[in-house]
Every structure is written in C-alpha cells, then in structure tokens.
Image (cartoon, helix red, strand yellow):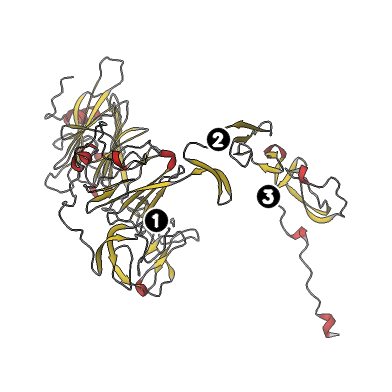
Amino acid sequence: MQQYSQRPSCPIPLTALPCPENSQYQLCGSVCPATCNDQAAPNNCSSPCMETCQCNEGFVLDAGKCIHKACCGCEFQGHLYAPGEQFWGDSTCTRRCVCDPQSRQVSCQATGCRTGEQCRVENGIQNCYPSSYRTCSASGDPHYTSFHIAVSFTRAVEVRVYGVNIMVSRDYPGRFLDAVIQTNFHLIITFDWQGQVTLTAPSTYTSAMCSLCGNFNGDKGDELIMKDGRAAPNATAFGQSWQVAEMFDCTEADNALSCPARSHYKLCMHTCDMKCITIAGLARCFEGCQCERGLASDGEACVSLDACGCTTYEGQYLQVDGTSLASVPFSTTLSFSPAGGIAPVCLPSGSLTCTPHWCPSRRPCGLRNSMRGCYAKRHPCLVAPGQLLSTFDGFSGAAPISGAHDVSRVCEQNTTSWFRFVLESWQWQPDARHVAMVYMILSAVFIATDTEGTAWVNGQEVLLPTSINAELSLTRSQQGMVVQWMEKVEAHLNATGVLEVTANGSYAAQLCGACGNFNGDSMDDLMACGGRPASNTQEVLASWVAEDFSSSW
C-alpha cells in the first residue's frame, strides 16, 4: 500500500501559468494555430485539440509571441521576412529584395556585388563580401609598411569614421590588451597601446585610397605618391606631404625601440601570440617587443602564465587584484541594488569575485574615453551673443555683447592646468546673426576658430580633425567646432556664434571671467572683474572686455 500512496505529482495546469501577451488559456485549442506564415501550415488540421495558449482574435503566433496580423512580414519562396527587411532573392546576389511593410509584398530589383566583392555565405548570412584584404601597418619606432612596400618614416595615424572621431591613444591606455575597431564596411583597425597599428582594408577600396598607406592598386612601384599627386623624391618628403598635425613626442629615427623588462626586440613577431588572453589576430608578423620564453604580456608587463589576470564576461581583461567599472551602473550611495553597485575583482587564482563599489556624490559614475568610472562633474557655461549668458553655476541673464570678452580662464596663471577662452563676436547688420571667433590660449599653444569651421593653431591654418598633441584636439561635429583639452575642459562653437565651455570639477572655485567662479553658488556670479558687485549680466560682460584683443568690428 505504501508504494501506491507515493503517487507522482501531477503537472501544473496551464491555468496556473501565465500565457503570452495577447493570448488566453484554452483547454481544447487548435494544434495548428494561425501564424504569419499560414501558407506553410498543413491544408487540413485533423489532429485533436490540445490544452494550450491561443492568440486572441486578430493576432497570430510568431516566434512564440502573439502579434497583430498587421505586424506580419512577407512570405517569399517559403521563407518569412520581417517588414522592411532586405535580402537577396537568389543565390548569386543578382536580385535585391525588400519586404514592403504596407502591402506585405516582396519587391525585387536587379543589382549585383560591387567590384572587389564576391557573393557568398558567411556565418549563415548570404551577402556580398570583399574578395580579399590588404593590411597597412605602422609601429612607433618609427617604421611603417604600406599595402605593397616597406619604408621607414615617423608614424602619424588618425581615424575618422561614421562622422565621429575614435581615439585610442597610448597616453590613455585601455584595460584591453588590443583595441580593435571594425566597421560594417569591413575596415579593421587594431592598436596594441605599444605603438603597433594595423589597418586592414577590403578589396572594395582597390585604387580608391590615398595616404601614407598608398593607393591600394596592387602596384608597388607607385607607392610614394605625395598629397599633391607628384612622385616623392624620398620617403621623408613622402611622409611630410601627408602630415596633418604636429607630433611632439615622436621617437628619433636612429633610436632603437625601447622594450619593457623581461622582453626583447624582435623584427618579426606575432602581435597576438604569448598574451594573457587570446584574440583573433592577423597571420602576418610585425616589429615589436616579445616576452621572454615562458612569459606572457598582460598589457603592461611580461608576467609568468600563472600570474595572468582574468577576463570578464564582456571580454575585458583585468590584471590580478584589478577591478573594473566598465559595464556596471553604480549607485552614488552605499545602498546597492541588484542592478548595480557590484564591481568584478580579479583574484590571484585567476577567478573573478564581486565586491560593492560606490561613487561619491561629487564624482558620479560615468563614461570617459569609453571607460566607466567615478569622474568629477562637468558643468557647462553658455554664451549666446546678443541673447543669453548662463554661468557655470547656473545664473543666467541677457548678453547683448559685441567685441572680445574673457569668457573663462584660470585665475592663477602659474599653474600647469591654466587656460583662457576669449569670445569675439560682431554683427554685420542689426538684424543679422552674430559671427564669432573663439580663442583658446594655453601655455604653448594659441588656437583660433570661427563659425565657418576654420581653425588656426599658432597662426597656421589646420585641417580638421586634428590632434595638436596627445592632450589637445580639434574636431568638427554636427553642432560645430569642438576644442578638447584632455578631460579638463571642452568648448563648442556653433555656426550661430553660440559658445559652450565645459570644465570638470577640478577647476571648482578657480575660474575667472564672464562664466563665473565655478564654486557651486550662483548667487555670487554677478561679480565684475576686480571683485566688485554687478547689477546684471550686462555689467559683468562689460567688465570682462579682453583689451589685448583689439577688435575692429
């Protein structure tokens, strides 16, 4: 009797389980429910009914969810495609098709792969892919190898893609052993933070390139073509013709590459070999520093294999005892939620553990240089000539100005972090928009920019984007001109003459100028030059006229 009393537990009825949205429980529902691809269903469904979740009227089953019929895509040759989805209608990439969201019908046009592409399937996806790739490499010792020929010259690498600048600098090393930038048009750029840069271009760019890397036409005989189209008499003239910015910390041509301890110089080493983590690398070798036998690179030094660190779930490498704020949103208090407040820590055993982490109120969690951490707050000051002045601390008022004014500067000039911003604005006619010039003065650099998108550095016009040195850059965005000095200060000037200056918290209570003292108190921003009180923002601006910038407008 005891055997029979231990009856197996019955399955939980479906009424106790939630049905998907837009569906309801049915004790006897169809085993052939309506779907977006009804044409693939049997003509007659003779199977008995079953307990199930059935979609409501007007909804059909799609990928386990009940969606409205109007959201269904298109059926084409037995396959279902989402609304707006583009695909190839044949196996040779000669018909490009799209699913019309309105008619739910497929329309196709005759097309084909571009020159330098082949129709094939990669990772289960049919598409036109480059038929081949070529690699240009540069190393900081300084050598570079073009797509066809090897020469020697000082390195200069700058990348702009998708309308933005992506900077990976040796002065701001990452916590990954190699940086890899890959675009959807199959361009791949790598940097190992030790001076080794590679650019791999697809065959679709054959004969369409120009720069230090050559023209990518397969002919080694015409590599040394200068920017003006003439053949270079030597490598030095060739490199100088493609220079876009002055580099102050280049390695001297006759100096040997300096290698870290426990490593040695090697003319031909594989950059992805003997590292604490494995990454997909290129087959060819490069000049660089290779760790001694039995050691591996952890990104900063050569260590024994048992001293290698850990790899997070996001693929970020951590040294032993290292921690990361890279991908976790952290609380600004000591109360932690399940969604954040936990940072991974790498143990000597090579395993990860998690520990609470919090950011102080004045240094909230944020992203800088693609790295998450606790950073000082940034505060903008806005000057719209003829309209508005809004200080760092949030006080605002009218700004009917013309001429040159000190917008913001560090009060104490004898500091390494000193800067000065001067805004010069004028109107050609009373109703015309303001035209402006912005001047940024540092200890050894003078920058001038205008509303037309032109920039000068120390009196010489420069092409944008450009890096003046490792700390200072000039770029152009959709909003206008951008001047950025490390993580300290940033200025935006748009086409209408509006200037926005942003400083980080390290400048608190250290600034002078029309933008205020940046002490967190807006009540003392009505202060004229010299410390005397002002009655309005007009008086403040009038007191901060930049007399050493005599304007003729």
- Is residue 221 visible in the rendered structure shown here? yes
User: Residue 379: x and y, percent?
Assistant: 31, 43
Left or right, 538 with reference to 129: left
Q: Amino acid at mark 3?
A: Ala
- Is residue 365 visible in the rendered structure shown here? no
Q: Amino acid at mark 2?
A: Gly
User: Residue 145: x and y, percent?
Assistant: 29, 49
Q: For the residue labelled by badge 1, is the local secondary structure a helix, a strand or a loop?
A: loop
Q: For the residue labelled by badge 3, is the local secondary structure a helix, a strand or a loop?
A: loop
Q: Which labelled disc corresponds to residue 63?
A: 3
Q: Which labelled disc corresponds to residue 112?
A: 2
If you read the primary sequence from the N terminus, does the residue marked by circle 2 or circle 3 appear first?
3
Is 185 situated above or below 339? above
Left or right, 28 with reference to 542: right
Q: Give the foreground label among 2 and 3.
A: 2
User: Which residue position holds label 1?
Assistant: 282
Is 468 situated above or below 498? below
**CB atoms of marks 1 and 3 within 8 Å:** no
Q: For the residue labelled by badge 2, is the local secondary structure a helix, a strand or a loop?
A: loop
Q: CA distance from mark 2 to mark 1?
A: 30 Å
- In depth, the one of 129 and 326 nearer the eye is 129
Q: Which labelled disc corresponds to residue 210?
A: none
Image quarter hosting the N terminus? bottom right
